Image: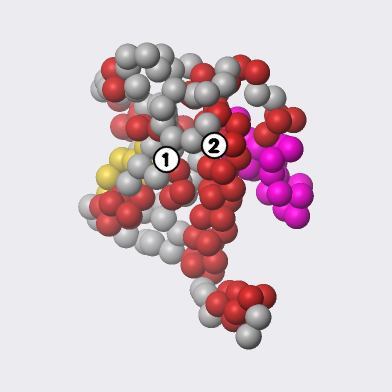
Amino acid sequence: MNEKEYIDRLWSSMDDSQKELLRILSENIITVGVRDSLRGGGIEEPEVDLSTITLGDIRALIPKSLTHEEKHIISMRVKYWLDLEQDKDWSLKKGYSRMRSNTRFKKAGTGESCEWPGCEEAADLVIDHRFPYSLGGDAEPENAGCLCKWHNLIKMNSPYSVIKWPKEQH
């Protein structure tokens, strides 16, 4: 069995929520790769001046085989992340001094059920930073969501498991 047949067989065995998670993960893998290529990997201070990175620079690193819509989504995610990083003081704070109580954030994160694809859990919900706080995500309402405790533990602080990016329509 060749690789395409194997992938087709796996795809056909998945339900819709599993396919949605695979799509999300794939887009996030590309997003992280493009971001790391532009600014240097990791969470340390960027290796370049982030203000010099253009949408053209971002788009040039996105695989040509993707659809126009997929390229747009990924380029907007990379831009969002780089814009967050550009506003941070990397010398001392590394994001930890941003801690503050934000009532608007807490109210925005009061959904009726878990946002994880396929999960309908409505009990034991926790407020989640859609884009991880540790990676520069802010405490604004558009970055607030609800996850059940289990999916919040799975998601952790990884950019690979961001289900809903702030400012995106879903």
Q: Quadrant of the N terminus?
A: bottom right
Q: Secondary structure at mark 1?
A: loop
Q: Is residue 78 magenta?
A: yes
Which disc is residue 36 wearing?
2
Q: Residue at x 37, y 27 (%)?
A: 139
Amino acid type at circle 2 is Asp
54 with respect to 106 (left or right) = right
Q: Nearer the viewer, residue 77 or 127?
A: 77
Q: Nearer the viewer, mark 2 or mark 1?
A: 2
Which residue lies under the disc numbered 1? 130
Q: Main secondary structure of the magenta part?
A: helix
Which amino acid does the dot numbered 1 rest on?
Arg
Q: Which residues are magenta?
A: 59-79
Q: Is residue 123 visible?
A: yes
**Percent of width and height locating residue 115:** 41, 52
Mark 2 or mark 1: which comes first in sequence? 2
Q: Residues within 10 Å of mark 1 (few under 14, many from 20)?
A: many
Cα distance, mark 2 to mark 1?
20 Å
Does the rendering let one see residue 110? no
Residue at position x 49%, y 67% in the image:
18
